[in-house]
Amino acid sequence: MGTIKFINKKIVIVGDVMKDTYLYGVTDRISPEAPVPVIKINKKSFSLGGAANVASNVSALGGDATLIGLTGKDQALADLTEKLSETKINAELVSSFKLKTIEKTRLISQNQQLIRVDEEDDWPQKVEKNQSLQKQLFAKFTKILEKKCDAVILSDYDKGSLASCQDFIKLAKSKKIPVLVDPKGTDFKKYQNAFLIKPNLTEFLKVVGQIKSELEFLEKGFNLCKKLNISALLVTKGSMGMTLMRKNRSFRHFGVHKYKEVFDVTGAGDTVLACITVGIASGLSLEESINISVVSAGIAVNKLGTYSPRLDELEGEVKSSREMNKNEVKGKKNHRKLECEKFNKLLSQKEMMGVVEDLRNKGQSIVFTNGCFDILHAGHIHLLTEAKKMGDILIVAINSDKSIKYLKGQTRPVNSLQKRIAILNAITFINFVIPFGSKTPLSLIKKIQPDVLVKGDEYSKEEVIGSFLVENYGGEVRLVNMVKDLSTTKIISRM
């Protein structure tokens, strides 16, 4: 992860606006009236909540944030308006005397949240039935998109503000503006055709049902992407990190940043989504943006209440993290781990460069090998096992079906590319799998520039595709002793 390249982009946030109030105090006795603690309040504060917290995070990261949402006409609105002005957020709020601004009050003692009190006034029922409010929200959205917008965030807390969210998605998509969604409820159909949806694990399971394995988790994620016609699904899993699944059935796992016991997870999801959106709008890849959001969330959860990490604060933490990873590489070479190592990853060539850059910044050594892997046998396993020993990260390039037909004839492959990839994905020590359709993997080798290029000793070094290139920039070419009389061609001939 290099220097953060966020640009002052126009981000529009639509959703349920709230006021978060915090009451801090000391608890040192139990009430004589009931077996509950007595809190002596000594401090009171409030912050932007719900969709307003997302906007606050966008603004703190240097984005030009515009917030669209519903409120009542009350003191809470006055407080929010003042705070929005302080944080330089453009407020396009629709207010009504028929509503009470949503307010969540948290009582905190000894750095622990003891109770939360919600004042909502039956929002979903009131808002969804009021077509006038819905039309006013969409009119504001339409007017803003007529000028300039680089990305849209839909922050849904199921309070009714996004009852007509398909209208927002369709308009944004017609203008080729990416829409990222923080969903709520069990009906994700209303988010179809968005760019990305970011549920937490609990929300995800409520939609797809319970899972029994990581493979089932991924399969249900891929199916949801296809069903909703979304480009990507990001499931946040607390201390277990996050998993990105794409419509093209590729995936990647992201670990947490400097995991330790946290103070408060309030608003962490808002921080993640805001950071990803600002990254995407600034031209970063989705993977790069998520990597940065992991660090941003790590900062937020170590603060009490909702917290919006500043860009300079985030850059400092990213730099610190990068230096820490380099020091770990020097002192514990045999114990280096990549955050995504728990999940083997199918990479498209488009995604590859961002991942390789991240590996380099973490000081990881990259081993590259390639093959058809049509009928996987003991010889393949031996080659891959030995290759993994030669570095930290093993990238396996696999020939497409068309490429194999060119090399092996029209009767091959025996197994389709999808089936061959599934088998390689089941080998836990393989970190990444990259399909390629050309006759040789030379173009991949040029882009990746692996530290070690590995092939079987049925070839000489001079015959290995890319060997001259790799040795020329200082890499190594290594040959693995192959298992005798064992090849896919020979297996087929015996059948």
Image (cartoon, rainbow, N blue to C red):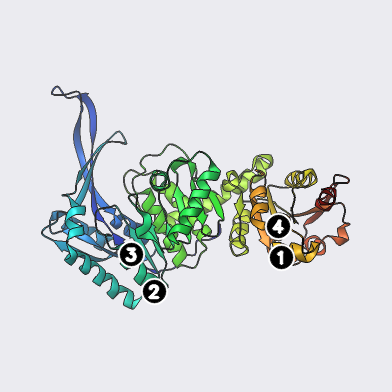
Secondary element at tag 2: helix
Residue drawn at x 31%, y 45% is: 305
Determine whether the residue tagged by mark 1 lies in a helix, strand or loop: helix
Residue 414 vs residue 65, the one in the foreground: 414
Work out whether 153 lies above or below 299. Answer: below
Q: In the image, which disc is placed on residue 166?
A: 3
Residue depth check, mark 1 versus mark 4: number of the one nearer the observer = 1
Left or right of 368: which side holds 2? Answer: left
Q: Could you say which is closer to the camera, residue 119 or residue 193? A: 193
Q: Nearer the viewer, mark 3 or mark 1?
A: 1
Determine if residue 467 is in view: yes
Label 4 Cα crowd, 10 Å radius (few <14 / some 14-19 / many 20+) = many
Q: Position of residue 171 (x, y in %)?
A: 34, 72
N-terminal label among 2 and 4: 2
- Secondary structure, mark 4, is strand
Q: Amino acid at mark 2?
A: Ser
**Can you give x and y, in whole percent of width and height, for residue 165 in the image?**
31, 62
Alpha-carbon span between mark 1 and mark 4: 12 Å
Q: CA distance from mark 1 to mark 2?
A: 35 Å
Say which amino acid is labelled 3: Gln
**Who's the residue at 25% across and 61% down the image?**
84
Q: CA distance from mark 3 to mark 2?
A: 12 Å
The mark found on residue 174 in the picture is 2
Identify the residue at the far front of this view.
495
Where is mark 1, residue-wise?
402
Cα separation between marks 4 and 3: 40 Å
**Marks 1 and 2 close (CB-CB < 8 Å):** no
Task: Answer whether labels 3 and 1 touch (C-beta < 8 Å).
Answer: no
